Amino acid sequence: MMLLDSRLTDCRRIFLHDFAVDASIGFHDFEKKARQRILISVDLFVAIGASTSASDDVKDVLDYDFLRLGISRIAQSRHFNLQETLIDQICALCLSQPSVRAARVESQKPDVYPDCKTVGIEVFRWAEGQHGPSR
């Protein structure tokens, strides 16, 4: 579990889960014919000092509205053959925020196959300077 990593013990986990967006995604011919619903989940790990407001003001913390808007913009920007490409772009958006120490991004395609609940991809990345396993 990511929260067990010693580099995250002083962090809050800020999350957006199961955000539904319609996207042009997939490499199968049937997927290229119409947009499909995908579910995006993101966990951001932000140091408590960078995610606390003494004045109870959103300007002092990471406003997760940027996530919803950014994910929507990325998902609508073009056709993606692979979920991996989509989540890599979303992860880059997350890690562009200076207060984000690490990010986990997941995408799921719940409607692509009739015989399973969902198929998906997940990635976890550290911000610059936070690479590698815990020692």
Image: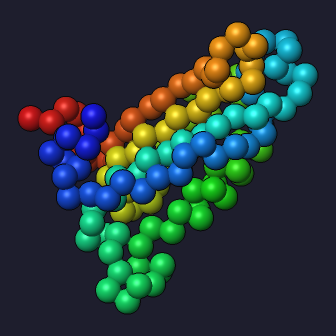
**Quadrant assignment for the N terminus:** top left
Q: Hey, which residue is sitting farthest left in the picture?
A: 135
- Does the image show residue 36? yes
- Residue 26 lies, with reference to residue 77, above or below; the image says above
Tally of numbered tags: 0
- Locate residue 23, reporting x and y percent: 77, 36
Q: Residue at x 35, y 69 (%)?
A: 51
- Locate residue 112, reporting x and y percent: 74, 19
Q: Is residue 33 left or right of residue 81?
A: right
- Locate residue 50, reporting x and y percent: 31, 70
- Does the image show residue 79? no
- Locate residue 47, reporting x and y percent: 27, 62
Q: Is residue 86 left or right of residue 27?
A: left
Along the line of sight, which residue is nearer the eye, 128 or 21?
21
- Residue 116 lies, with reference to residue 126, above or below; the image says above
Along the line of sight, which residue is nearer the eye, 31 or 119?
119
Q: Hey, which residue is sitting farthest right in the picture?
A: 33
**Quadrant assignment for the C terminus:** top left
Question: What colouring method underlies this structural image?
Answer: rainbow
Q: Residue at x 82, y 19 (%)?
A: 31
Q: Is residue 105 left or right of residue 129?
A: right
Quadrant of residue 61 within the rendered picture: bottom left
Q: Residue at x 60, y 42 (%)?
A: 18
